[in-house]
């Protein structure tokens, strides 16, 4: 039976996979994928809570739905900006591997 | 009062609407105007018009707008003025910046204005949806701004690092918000508060949620586990943007953290005039010792910031670490958890605004001429540009907290708040840190005035920058001897409203 816990577990797995990806990957595109995964885990969690909390217990029944939509919109905006920046970085370094951008750490 | 009335009066947000109109105008105007500097003047005009609307519309009464998304109270009024003034100062700052001169156009000022619009909403957010949206609005504009210089590779690198850190921190924060929503069934600060007070939630879950949410706040305030982005970004970003992030963006972080802690988490009624000089208590969460927790974060932040700043070779990077340390000092006001601590943070933000932008301005002036911010190149600048160097010395000694300057008074109230709450260990460590910080601030001053270099060529200061030095430098000196008007202002405007 599919209940709230199932969704929360899947959401949390997505979230942790995203964090794991951000911590281990060095390629900028892979980092971006990690961020997207993380945000989608949160969106799933929100959607699950919105679906399973009884409407009577909710103050404003559309809060959760609205938040999910905004997460998706902002994830898209963030991806657009990230890709623009990655193109800039590539144009200057011919590389998008964060390990190679060591200048800052000298 | 009907909490969820759909009544929307757009005229009530005239200052914010003014900024929106100007942002759209910049985007279109980019196609029309050939001389790009004109946008700088337009943006100054935009902020001034917004300020006028704010002062006209401000009726000294609290109100909730847009179905309980934002609140207008004295606290948000204070921060709106703070951000609009920051916008004006940063616009003048950008006029004569060699780093962005070539690309200076409508979109630059539009991005700054968009970030400021987001900050204004952050200061008034009383709903987690609005909090997240406004925080992201600030973040997204800041990512683009820190990567603004087209020729400089480090600028793009800074932007990428900022984006990765920022997106991760805000992702962690909304996970916390999601679970808080799951517990309480709402995103509304006052309803969440009512439910937290009743204490029906599993306390360990609540503690985890709070730490997740703090990740987003700490990132914006650049407090210790989430401070690593600041030095890289401040160093790589164009200097006006670094100053903007160090002051306005950090101020927005403090605004949202103050509002969250002092309305949602506080026991008893939210801050109001009646509670003058009372000690506050936060809602107990899993026996978390709030003053100890905030105090430890504060100590870690100021110590890490100051110790790392000691052996920096780039002045911009040094100022980045110093701004981390200053976030630590300001957090002392949180840890004290009394009314003095609350307005001391606001007062310190005012002083910090003046002295930190001033210090970055000097970095800009030097960079325009010699194209570097390396500390050894500051030798003999006292002779090459006497006026700016003297101003820089004032800002540096004020940052260190030397008595007759504004920074000392700011620190004085923070320490007074901490002592009132009997957190003596925190005060001792704070004072030790202040002494430590004097070393690296004084080192720059020593380089400028006591050491000589073979370079004798004058470093010119443009008219806009002289104007800024005057309007930033004199208040720092005056606040050191006559600070009561600002203190009274800050006291009046440190009242939060939660319906």
Image (spheres, rainbow, N blue to C red):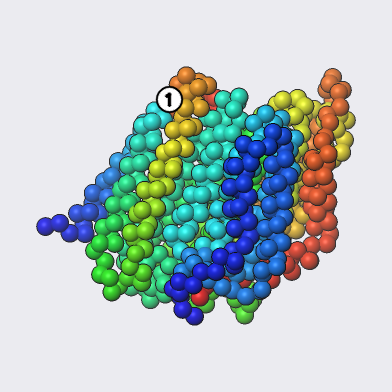
Residue B23 position in % (x across, y down): 60, 48
Residue B241 visible to an observer of this rendering: no
Residue B211 position in % (x across, y down): 42, 55
Relative to B183, residue B304 above or below: above
Instruction: Tally the numbered discs.
Output: 1
Relative to B117, residue B194 above or below: below
Pick the residue in front: B236 or B292: B236
Q: Residue at x 31, y 56 (%)?
A: A46
Q: Is residue B102 left or right of residue B170?
A: right
Residue at disc 1, secondary structure: loop
Return the residue found at the far front: B32
Q: Residues within 10 Å of mark 1 (few under 14, many from 20)?
A: some
Q: Residue at x 28, y 52 (%)?
A: A44
Residue B309 position in % (x across, y down): 64, 38
Q: Which residue is mark 1?
A: A97
Q: Residue at x 81, y 32 (%)?
A: B448
Q: Residue at x 63, y 56 (%)?
A: B18
Q: Is residue B401 left or right of residue B427?
A: right
The answer for which chain carries disc 1 is A
């Amino acid at each position: 039976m599919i209940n709230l816990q199932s969704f929360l577990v899947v959401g949390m797995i997505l979230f942790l996979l995203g964090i794991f990806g951000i911590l281990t990957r060095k390629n900028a595109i892979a980092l971006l994928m990690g961020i997207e995964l993380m945000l989608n885990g949160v969106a799933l969690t929100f959607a699950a809570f919105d679906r399973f909390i009884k409407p009577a217990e909710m103050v404003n029944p559309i809060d959760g739905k609205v938040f999910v939509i905004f997460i998706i919109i902002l994830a898209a905006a963030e991806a657009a900006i990230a890709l623009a920046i990655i193109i800039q970085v590539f144009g200057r370094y011919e590389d998008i591997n964060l390990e190679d951008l060591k200048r800052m750490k000298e | 009062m009907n909490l969820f009335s759909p009544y929307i009066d757009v005229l009530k947000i005239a200052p914010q609407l003014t900024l929106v109109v100007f942002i759209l105008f910049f985007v279109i105007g980019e196609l029309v105007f050939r001389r790009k500097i004109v946008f700088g003047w337009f943006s100054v005009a935009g902020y001034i018009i917004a300020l006028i609307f704010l002062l006209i519309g401000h009726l000294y009464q609290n109100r909730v707008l847009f179905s309980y998304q934002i609140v207008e109270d004295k606290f948000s009024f204070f921060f709106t003025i703070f951000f609009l003034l920051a916008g004006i100062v940063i616009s003048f700052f950008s006029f004569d910046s060699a780093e962005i001169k070539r690309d200076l156009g409508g979109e630059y000022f539009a991005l700054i204005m968009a970030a400021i619009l987001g900050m204004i909403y952050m200061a008034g957010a009383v709903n987690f949806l609005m909090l997240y949206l406004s925080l992201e609005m600030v973040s997204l504009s800041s990512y683009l701004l820190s990567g603004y210089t087209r020729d400089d590779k480090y600028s793009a690198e800074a932007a990428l690092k900022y984006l990765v850190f920022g997106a991760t921190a805000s992702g962690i924060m909304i996970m916390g918000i999601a679970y808080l929503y799951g517990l309480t069934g709402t995103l509304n600060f006052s309803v969440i508060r009512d439910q937290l007070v009743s204490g029906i939630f599993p306390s360990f879950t609540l503690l985890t949620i709070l730490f997740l949410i703090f990740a987003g706040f700490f990132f914006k305030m650049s407090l210790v586990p989430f401070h690593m982005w600041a030095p890289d970004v401040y160093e790589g970003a164009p200097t006006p943007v670094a100053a903007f992030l160090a002051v306005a963006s950090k101020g927005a972080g403090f605004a949202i953290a103050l509002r969250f802690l002092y309305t949602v988490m506080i026991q008893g009624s939210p801050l109001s005039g009646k509670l003058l000089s009372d000690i506050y208590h936060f809602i107990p969460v899993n026996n978390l010792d709030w003053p100890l927790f905030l105090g430890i974060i504060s100590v870690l932040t100021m110590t890490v910031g100051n110790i790392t700043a000691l052996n920096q070779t780039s002045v911009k990077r040094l100022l980045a670490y110093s701004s981390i340390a200053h976030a630590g000092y300001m957090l002392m006001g949180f840890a004290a958890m009394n009314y003095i601590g609350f307005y001391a943070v606001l007062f310190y933000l005012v002083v910090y605004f003046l002295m930190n932008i001033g210090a970055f301005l000097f970095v800009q002036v030097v960079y325009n001429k010699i194209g570097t911010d390396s500390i050894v190149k500051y030798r003999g600048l006292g002779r090459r540009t006497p006026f700016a160097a003297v101003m820089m010395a004032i800002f540096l000694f004020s940052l260190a907290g030397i008595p007759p300057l504004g920074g000392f008074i700011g620190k004085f109230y923070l320490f007074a708040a901490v002592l009132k709450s009997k957190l003596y260990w925190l005060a001792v460590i704070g004072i030790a840190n202040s002494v430590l910080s004097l070393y690296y601030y004084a080192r720059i001053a020593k380089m400028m005035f006591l050491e000589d270099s073979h370079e004798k060529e004058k470093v010119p200061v443009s008219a806009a920058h002289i104007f800024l030095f005057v309007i930033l430098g004199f208040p720092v000196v005056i606040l050191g001897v006559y600070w009561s008007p600002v203190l009274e202002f800050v006291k009046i405007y440190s009242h939060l409203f939660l319906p």
